[in-house]
Amino acid sequence: MSVVFFLRDSIAVAENEFRQFRRNRSAILISLIILPFFFTASLGAGQGGAGTTFSATADIPIMFVDNDNSLASLRLLQTLTSSADFHSLIQSYNEQTAVAALGTKRTYAVIVVPKGFQNDLAIGRQARVILYTDDSEPGVSDQIESTLSTYVQNFNPNLEVQTFLTALQKQSISQVEIVRKGAIFAGFNVGLTIVLAVVQIFAGFYEIAGGMSREREEGTYARLLLTPIPIGSIVLGKTIFDLLLSVVRTFIVLGLSVYGYGARPNTDIVTLLALSLLVALVTMGLGFVASALKMGQRAVVIVEFFLILFLFAFSGLIIDKELLVGVSQVIANLLPFTYAFDALRRTVLLGRSLLSLTGDLQYMIGSCIVFYATAFILLLKSRERLIR
Amino acid sequence: MSDNSVTSQELTKIFGHFRAVDTLNLNVKGGELFGLLGPNGAGKTTTVRMLCTLIEPSIGTASVAGYDIRRDAAAVRRSIGVVSEGVSLYKDLTIEENLKLLSTLYDIPRGRAENRIKELLEMFAFREKTRRLVGALSSGWAKKAMICAALLHDPKVLFLDEVTSGLDPQSAIALQDFTRNLCNQGVTVIWTTHYMTEPEKICDRVGVMFAGRLVQVGTPNELKHSVSELSLVEVETPDLSPTQLEKVRHKLNSINHVCKVKYADSKLQVSCERTETLAEEVASALLDAGARIRAINTRDPTLEEAFIAMTGGEEEIDRFLEGAGQKA
């Protein structure tokens, strides 16, 4: 029976949150319009403009050298030129001259079909396509490599792409594995992973920590504490309401990304929603901890600013976690949001199932439990500090 | 009046090194209107907050409506109503919505809650204001809304903490009458205030708090009589020059029982230990100094004056307020 009362109280708190939210235009504006639309639209516009399917490689000048002069190599060229991703493919007849043009901004990559390409395919051996890239533009190189690999794999599954990175004309040739992380996928998929996580983190923290500090400063938290309901009901009620908002936000970001900016997430909606809500829950837990520390509304804004800085610097949002060094990597490994970004990328970009992400999920769920437990204990212990 | 409704034993609250409330022993009977009187920082609000379970005592305990504030905090909360400066309603909701939320949290059955809400809103004549957001109400109406919220669940004990501050005089008087009626219906009310005239008018008993301690408890009359050794003489004497005032002061100070001489708005006020001859001595000093006397009057001390005497005089209070200001 007490569980029923607990849930009923929690739902009453959630309903109350909803009533207030519906009256508060600025809260609606920030939570459901500015944050999801602003982030998605700004990143989307930066990657191609609304209403178009954006290709990062379409207008990049790339040279194509056919040393095989076979039907197979011709077909590969036709495949690339007829695609929407290689509008500026320039045919060249001399490999050396083409490679020499790297680093001059006249071309950013050279695709070379070596002799024996067709023969290898005919006898069922792995054929090779050599890709020279300008490593002064690593982001562009990664993008070209990944886009090319998609077409090469579609062209013949036995093909592999070998990248020969050159620093301008230095021919330091080495075989590298294709890393399917970062901005290597067509469309707005990468943008979707970033926007979804950032929006949930930004909004979740603002709503919980900011909302609690507002309640404390206005004296309504003391009013709740004077009723017989337990603190757990207050926490659960606020969480339920914010989770519902997070669902709405997820659909706004997803809809805008897919229909506005051509994202094609490689996963199902349930997985995406589950991950999005998990990110929101971890953030809300952190928000409750912040609010239990008697943080004022101004302090919440400052902490949110630092939180975003941390996300940008240490959580793999800009620099991959693997590329960080020293203390930065330690911080990245401790931040639950690092695992959130990782999980979102693996699902949205690679189509991995949630079951294959147990490590990431465990860390996120663990962090969520730790945050909520800490917040609960602090809220219990610091009742008097939380009263105006 | 029935058994004790609020009792405390050695109730103490320490913030760091500061004893906000110091070994408070209180007994308030059921249906009693008990005033807690004291200047800002005396420990009244902290006492109320401990009694209504918002903060935990450092030492000692208390029981409210028969429930221990430490062990049965939820039961205490069900039995009390609180109107305090730090406790508010949701500004983005109407008074009706606020009351509906609270009725759920207090576990009041829906039908009963609806009737009670209607009754309260009619009692306080909210009329069309029921649909107005609390944030849009004037401070007087907002205070009435808070009183409605405090009364919603028919509390046995009502805490009214500085409830008249910000109210216009008519509303304050109406609220005092309303509170008196509540007590007649058996509700215990603890009324904290720093306005000295309020408890004198309405409270059954008054507890005087100063520097965290309960200095004295009694009916307003008892408190006044407890300082009955105080004699007060007021003389209406216009145009008293500084030289004349100095002469009067010098003369009166030579009489060892005189404690204080004040002159403001053409009125000379002399207070001292009880003596039958004070009026004559004051009149004589004034006439010797060449002052005119328009009227002379002796009277009993007010509760405010009794309070000042109980707490060690105005200098002591000023020192305390200065200290409280520094702490704040």
Image: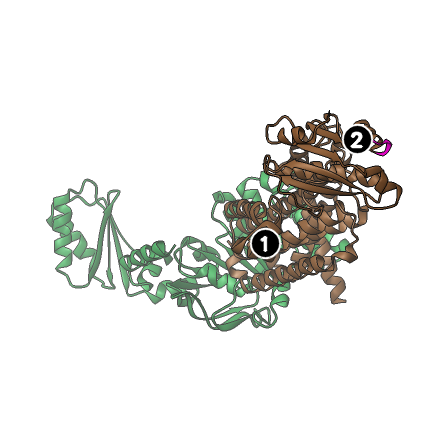
> Is residue B128 visible in this depiction of the protein?
no
Q: Give the CA distance from mark 2 to mark 1.
A: 39 Å
Q: Position of residue A154 (x, y in %)?
A: 84, 39
Picture residue at 71% right of the left edge, 31% below the top:
A57
Which chain identifier belongs to the green chain?
Answer: B
* Position of residue B251 in the picture relative to residue B315 (left or right): left
Q: Earlier in the sequence, mark 2 or mark 1?
A: 2
| Extent of the magenta region | A68-72
Q: Kindly identify which chain the residue marked by label 2 belongs to.
A: A
| Mark 2 Cα-neighbour bin, 10 Å: few <14, some 14–19, many ≥20 | some
Q: Which mark is residue A183?
A: none
Task: Look at the image and tell me whether residue A267 can be seen.
Answer: yes
Q: Position of residue B166 (x, y in %)?
A: 48, 45
| Amino acid identity at mark 2 | Leu
Q: Identify the subunit bearing mark 1.
A: A
Position above or below: A217 against A98: below
- Discs 2 and 1 share one subunit: yes
What type is the residue that disc 1 sits on?
Ala
> Where is residue B216, by image quadrant?
bottom left
- Relative depth, front residue between A190 and B140: A190
Which callout, 2 or 1, points to the residue nearer the camera?
Answer: 2
Chain A colour in the picture: brown
Q: Which secondary structure type mostly characterizes the magenta part of the structure?
A: loop
Count the marks: 2
For mark 1, what is the residue?
A332
Residue at image coords 57%, 72% = B3
Asked if residue A289 is among those painted magenta in the image, a careful observer would answer no
Disc 1 residue crowd, few under 14, some 14–19, many 20+, Cα 10 Å: many
Helix, strand, or loop for circle 1? helix
Disc 2 target residue: A80
